[in-house]
Amino acid sequence: MTQRIICIILILLVSHLPIMKSASAQFVPAIDLECQSVHPSGNLELYVSNNSSGNVSDYAECTVSNPNLYQEKIRIIILSGPLNQEGPADFYVEANSEVDFQVKIWTNATPAEVGGENQTRELTIIAEVLEANGLPPPIYTSSESELLVDIIVYEEANETEMIISEKTDDKKSLIYAGGGGAVLLLLILFISIKRRTTFR
């Protein structure tokens, strides 16, 4: 009799096992992150100049999606190397929905500090799940997006000098042209006076 009861209990447990598995599977967190640049090149762009008047900051547009049937709390981690960065604080993503946000990067470096040459750096943005349905997730879950940042050295001082030089050359040309015209006018006037004197 006791063996029959044990067998019945085991049969009931085995028959409910798939239901328990499917229920636990529903609470496995998942997240999807996509980030992109606003430039046609697909890369973020920072223009570094001597007086920092160029485009020293840029941003990426990101979307994080929650495909689950419950709310998730998300944290954004930004790996930007020597570049300064700014992103959102922890936030919630509702079930079967998405949230848009921006990640900003910038630099205060001068052309000399970046080696005086154009360069490209990596930017990694990670979204990790902190809570799933109000509880810590049973497993670590994250999604990441990788972008490139083009650092372009902009020698504004040199370009200004070139413009000044060109304007100076133009002024010199005008002076030479004006001087030549004055000499020609004096020569015509001298010839005219000489002819009048000869006819008299």
Image (cartoon, helix red, strand yellow):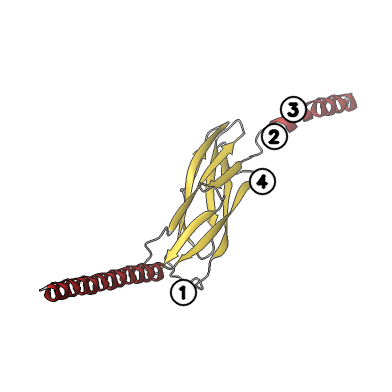
- How many residues crowd mark 3 within 10 Å: few (<14), some (14–19), many (20+)? few
Q: Earlier in the sequence, mark 4 or mark 3?
A: 3
Q: Residue 19: which numbered mark, if any? A: 3
Q: CA distance from mark 4 to mark 1?
A: 46 Å
Compared to residue 54, the image places residue 13 above or below, namely above
Q: Earlier in the sequence, mark 4 or mark 1?
A: 1
Asked if the residue at tag 1 contacts the one at tag 2, i.e. Cβ–Cβ closer than 8 Å, the answer is no
Q: Nearer the viewer, residue 18 or 6?
A: 18
Q: Amino acid at mark 3?
A: Ile
Q: CA distance from mark 2 to mark 1?
A: 57 Å
Q: What's the residue at 27%, 73% (across, down)?
A: 180
Q: Residue 112: which numbered mark, if any? A: 1
Q: CA distance from mark 4 to mark 2?
A: 12 Å
Q: Is residue 115 left or right of residue 2?
A: left
Q: Nearer the viewer, residue 157 or 36?
A: 157
Q: Is residue 186 left or right of residue 129?
A: left
- Where, quadrant-wise, is the N terminus in this rendering? top right
Q: Which residue is mark 2?
A: 24
Q: Earlier in the sequence, mark 2 or mark 1?
A: 2
What is the secondary structure assignment of the residue under circle 3? helix
Q: Nearer the viewer, mark 2 or mark 1?
A: 1
Q: Quadrant of residue 72?
A: top right
Q: Residue 139: which numbered mark, if any? A: 4
Question: Residue 105 at x, y = what percent?
Answer: 47, 56
Q: CA distance from mark 4 to mark 3?
A: 20 Å
Q: CA distance from mark 3 to mark 1?
A: 64 Å
Asked if the residue at tag 3 contacts the one at tag 4, i.e. Cβ–Cβ closer than 8 Å, the answer is no
Q: What's the residue at 24%, 72% (across, down)?
A: 184
Q: Is residue 116 visible?
A: yes
